[in-house]
Image (spheres, rainbow, N blue to C red):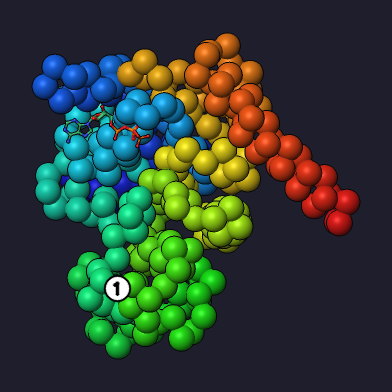
Amino acid sequence: MDSAKSTPQPDQPVIQVKGLVNRFGAHVVHENLDLTLKRGEILGVVGGSGTGKSVLLRSIVGLKRPNGGAVEVLGNTLNELDDKQRSQIERRFGVLFQRGALFSSLNLQENIALPLIEHARLPREDAEHLARVKLALVGLPPQAALQFPESLSGGMVKRAALARALALDPEILFLDEPTAGLDPIGAAAFDQLLVTLRNALGFSVFLVTHDLDTLYAACDRVAVLSQKRVLVVDTIDKVADTDDEWVQDYFHGPRGRAAQRAHAAFSTNAYTQE
Ligand SMILES: Nc1ncnc2c1ncn2[C@@H]1O[C@H](COP(=O)(O)OP(=O)(O)OP(=O)(O)O)[C@@H](O)[C@H]1O
């Protein structure tokens, strides 16, 4: 049976992490961690530094083999797949790592064409044409196609990295700190772009972030990692009400209050302009 081709039902989660254990030597990062990503949602994953957000992302995308538990992605249990099945599943992901991971020796068009040539086996000309379409999709001007990463602003690099993550039309997009290093206006534009693209293309998003504005502006649900597991996962208002010291400091400290006020003002404004 070619299990890597199985597709979850519309109401079945696209990711189910069950009883996950991760450790490095004696250092236990995750213990019996459960988490679900629903189809079409943007799930924000937050937690203090070192709580294992990136390790969780890496376990799901197959870059870290868990020490226990199961990760089910798109109806497939990852550790039951052979290499070929696993790479079929991985082609259905798009991943944007914290530092963008564009090749500095390639221009943007070539960077985005690369996965199309390597994985979708498109001829170079078709791949570069599609790459230009993806660059337009993320709001970059046509002339950006021939520019090299080092000549771009941080916001443009993030958009280009997003275009690359979207190259193979992924069903799940993984983003690790996508707004880190952007100014607030650039970060807000990225959040808006993410929501617009999700609404248009229907992918699901697993988003690791420290950015409170992103949580309010883009996420349908928020998961808090603490004490080696998911402490709470729910809508942001319910999560912010959780009786936990880190959650209270994070959501109700000065930055949390500012993000909440900004979101409330934006929502009221959007409503009155309808
Ligand atoms: N390859 C590795 N070898 C040893 N320890 C590791 C490795 N990768 C991660 N860790 C440890 O696992 C823990 C979780 O790391 P992780 O990067 O997932 O944290 P995080 O929640 O993403 O943190 P931050 O918010 O600071 O980015 C940390 O204590 C880290 O030092």
Q: Height in image: 116 above or below 220?
A: below
35 to 161, vertically: above or below: above
Q: Is residue 196 above or below residue 120?
A: above
Residue found at x 45% / y 74%: 135
| Quadrant of res 217 | top right
Q: Quadrant of residue 96?
A: bottom left
Query: Looking at the rendering, which quadrant does residue 132 occupy?
Result: bottom left
Mark 1 closeness class: few <14, some 14–19, many ≥20 residues within 10 Å? many
Figure label count: 1
Image coords of residue 194 (percent x, y): 54, 55
| SS class, disc 1 | helix
Q: Is residue 146 left or right of residue 211?
A: left
- Mark 1: which amino acid? Asn
| Ligand 1 quarter of the rendering | top left
Q: Which residue is mark 1?
A: 111
Image spot of residue 227 (x, y percent) = 36, 15
Considering every residue shown, the one lying at the far front of the view is 254
Please indicate, yes or no, whether residue 251 appears anywhere in the rendered image. yes
The answer, for residue 195, to whether it is visible in the render is: no
Q: Residue at x 47, y 25 (%)?
A: 224
**Residue at 37% across / 81% down in the picture?**
147
Report the residue at 27% width, 44% height from top.
61
Question: Could you tell me which quadrant the N terminus lies in?
Answer: top left
Percent x, y of residue 206: 43, 42
Which quadrant would the C terminus be assigned to in this image? bottom right
**Which one is in front, 31 or 4?**
31
Residue 231 locus on image (x, y percent): 45, 18
Tell whether 28 sits left or right of 100: left
Does 140 sit above or below residue 59? below
Looking at the picture, tell me which residue is in the foreground, 159 or 64. 159
